Image (cartoon, rainbow, N blue to C red):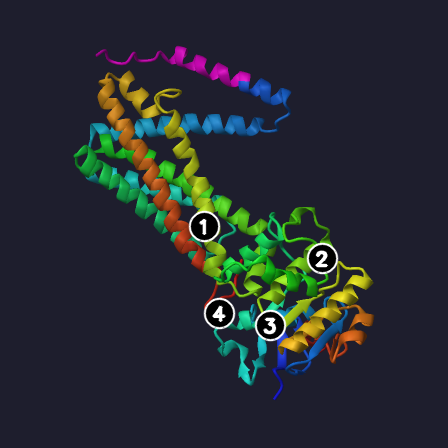
Amino acid sequence: MNEVVAMNIWQFGLIYLLLIIVLLIMKKCRINRTKLLFTASLRMTVQLALAGLVLTYILQNPHPLFTVAYLALMTCFAVYTVLSRNKGINKRFKIIVAASLAGTGLTIVAFFILAVVGVSLFNPQYTIPISGMIIGNAMTGVGLGLRVFNENIRTQRVLIENLQNIGATPQKILLPFVNQALETALLPTLNSMIGMGIISLPGMMTGQILSGTLPMTAIMYQIAIIIAICAVTCLAVFFSLFFGYRTLYNSRQQMCI
Amino acid sequence: MPLFSARNVCFKGIVQYPDIDIEEGRATFISGESGCGKSSLLRLISGVTSPDAGEITYRGKPVADYDPVGLRREVLLCSQASYLFDTDVDENFAKYYGYRDLPAPTPEQIRPYLGVCAFDMPGNTPCHTMSGGERQRVFTAICLSLRPKVLMMDEPTSALDDTTANKMLSNIKIFCAEHGITLIVVSHNAALVQAYADDIITLGVCLQTITAGRAQA
């Protein structure tokens, strides 16, 4: 297999021209998000460039401490992102979300690296990119699940109050909201699995094939990572909401929502 | 011994209730200006919320000492903002019964309660096409059919015309008397209060706001 063609920096710059098209369409449709487009593009470029530099250094000087530090930083950032997007939840709920996200994310990463790939957890070449995909997807799933859960509870306040008044237990009242949010959080992953290989060649696989990996090996990695993403999303959202919803009522079974 | 007693009850640092006694087996109406804490009083009695200070007792025992969910089933609050699912009447009974872990009632079991609440449409009528008053009556029928020992209704006639309101309240009062259900009703309709109340509690006169009290001190 051939090595991937290294991009010339000027040719690489051509890709940014596509953003001008996005900008023009946004202007035409009066989508007032020009600033966001600039910030997002700039942040992505700077963040990825920095990550590239850090990864180059870590891969050239592999040390367990670097891998652990990278994992810790990534997990903290994921927790921070989810919590900062769901400010309305109480403190105990926040702790449960943080523990669920970090706990399930790191467990699935460890299972993937140690059992499925069979290399050391401190091997940065495997652990860093794979944990990025797993924890990143867990973060998106938990963020979506929490948002749907909170929105549904807010819009169904009258129902919740009536059910409480007629003597339904808080568990019976809130569990359907947990189930519904979990379903919504899982759907994007499940839907993407349906079209995979036919309408999309996923990112990791594309990357591996570009860099010269045999397609069958790339496919095995891809299948493994998608199943890991499905599992981590399910577990992280389930633990966050299943334990989190219990913070919404007190020992007198009074709701504080 | 009164069924309920409230002593020195203060709620959310705003409402100071007068001492209140409610007798068993009677229809007690609570009236008063809006914002004087009528609905909150019902919520305090059923233990859905707790007072900052003071104590409410039910059969001589503090409300806080009862199993909370058990008490709400016994002392059931039919709130003003009713909620019906987007299905038909019978299915709404089934859904609410499901939340109470009860088997769905049959149409034959449902019909008498709809009759008491002056609702004469068939059980397969879709609820989303109903008027506010019809929805309120269906919801009241659901609450009544759960057969609590105490039924508390918050403005049950707010969406009804006078004729329907009279018919429903008269039916409910007879039903409750026949089945030994104590009735507590919040209403601002003076004519209805006069017509159906055995006892009247008027809030507002004895009501003080704590903040105002502190400001004067």
Q: Which residue is mark 4?
A: A252
At label 1, which amino acid type do we have? Val
Q: The residue tagged with tag 1: helix, strand or loop?
A: helix
Residue contact at pointers 2 and 3, CB within 8 angstroms = no
Cα distance between the residues tagged 2 and 3: 34 Å
Magenta-drawn stretch contains B105: no
At label 3, which amino acid type do we have? Leu
Q: Which segment is the magenta one?
A: A1-21
Left or right of A8 in this view: B87: right
What secondary structure is the stretch in magenta mostly built from?
A: helix
Residues tagged by mark 1 and mark 2 found on one chain of the structure = no
Residue contact at pointers 1 and 4, CB within 8 angstroms = no
Q: Residue at x 69, y 46 (%)?
A: B129
Q: Which residue is mark 3?
A: B44
Where is residue B115, by image quadrant?
bottom right
Q: Residue at x 72, y 69 (%)?
A: B171
Q: The residue tagged with tag 3: helix, strand or loop?
A: helix
User: Quadrant where the N terminus of chain B lies?
Assistant: bottom right
| For marks 2 and 3 on the same chain, the one whose residue lies earlier in the sequence | 3
Determine if residue A82 is in view. no
At label 4, which amino acid type do we have? Arg
Q: The residue tagged with tag 2: helix, strand or loop?
A: loop
Q: Which residue is mark 2?
A: B120
Residue contact at pointers 4 and 3, CB within 8 angstroms = no
How packed mark 2 is, by other alpha carbons closer than 10 Å (few <14, some 14-19, many 20 or more), is: few
Determine if residue B65 is in view. yes
Chain of the residue where label 4 is placed in the rendered structure: A
Q: Percent from the top left, x then y, of residue B177?
A: 67, 77
Closer-to-camera residue (B112/B5): B112
